[in-house]
Image: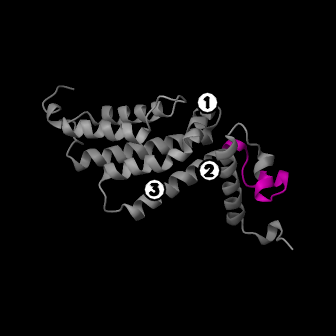
């Protein structure tokens, strides 16, 4: 006999819902997935999903948060001794599977605080990794490079790579090229007026 809701710990049920939502969002997209689909896939009564997540945006944001947290944990375990650029590129490469979901986040940003917060967390991770790359090469001081500009360009490259079209190279390739170009030309930053 299946366990009822009281017998299943809340965290386990949330995990089931997130796993089902992840599979559905990847297979059918955000727009093509409903809360009813998610609850059915997780074996939760249709209305009971709202005990765990108030809206589809909330579960979507939780899926994306979970993906980023997992990726950060994996990078920390597998590439703990790698240089920051390698960790950034690997992280973006590994997350390429989620590109359609990142694109869907852009559609939801104006409508959902939860999605906006998750999106900002994701961009903050990229900025943090760019800061690590620059610090490793002594480019984190204003006298050497305009670190804020480099951060903004890296985010713009990433966001631009996630605009739906067939011509974009993967974001991890473009950001690697950007950071390697900045590192190679770092002498040209010295003495530049800001």
Specify whether residue 96 is in view: yes
Say which mark, if any, is on residue 1.
none
Task: Say whether disc 3 or disc 2 marks the residue closer to the N-terminus.
Answer: 2
Task: Say whether disc 3 or disc 1 marks the residue closer to the N-terminus.
Answer: 3
Residue 161, above or below 59 = above
Q: Quadrant of the C terminus?
A: top left
- Frontmost residue, 182 versus 65: 182
Q: Residue furthest top?
A: 193
Q: Secondary structure beneath disc 3? A: helix
Which residue in the structure is indicated by mark 1?
A: 110
- For the residues bearing labels 3 and 2, Cβ distance under 8 angstroms: no
Say which mark, if any, is on residue 63.
2
Which residue in the structure is indicated by mark 3?
A: 72
Dominant SS of magenta comes to helix
Specify whether residue 144 is in view: no
Q: Secondary structure beneath disc 2? A: helix
Q: CA distance from mark 3 to mark 1?
A: 26 Å
Q: Residue furthest bottom?
A: 1
Q: Residue at x 18, y 37 (%)?
A: 186
- The part of the chain drawn in magenta is 39-58
Apparent side of residue 91 relative to residue 191 in the rendered image (left or right): right
Q: Residues within 10 Å of mark 1 (few under 14, many from 20)?
A: few
- Frontmost residue, 126 versus 101: 101
Q: CA distance from mark 3 to mark 2?
A: 14 Å
- Frontmost residue, 7 versus 41: 41
């Amino acid at each position: 006999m299946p366990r009822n809701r009281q017998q299943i710990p809340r965290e386990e049920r949330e995990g089931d819902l997130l796993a089902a939502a992840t599979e559905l969002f990847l297979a059918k997209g955000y727009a093509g997935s409903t809360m009813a689909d998610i609850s059915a896939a997780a074996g939760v009564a249709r209305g009971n999903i709202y005990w765990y997540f108030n809206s589809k945006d909330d579960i979507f944001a939780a899926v994306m948060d979970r993906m980023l947290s997992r990726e950060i944990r994996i990078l920390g375990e597998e590439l703990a001794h790698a240089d920051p650029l390698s960790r950034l590129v690997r992280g973006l490469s590994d997350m390429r599977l989620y590109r359609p979901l990142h694109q869907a986040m852009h559609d939801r940003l104006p409508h959902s605080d939860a999605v906006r917060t998750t999106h900002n967390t994701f961009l903050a991770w990229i900025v943090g990794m760019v800061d690590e790359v620059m610090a490793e090469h002594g480019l984190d001081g204003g006298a050497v490079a305009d670190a804020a500009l480099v951060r903004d360009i890296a985010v713009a490259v990433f966001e631009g790579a996630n605009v739906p079209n067939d011509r974009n190279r993967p974001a991890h390739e473009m950001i690697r090229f950007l950071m390697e170009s900045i590192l190679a030309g770092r002498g040209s930053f010295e003495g530049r007026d800001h």
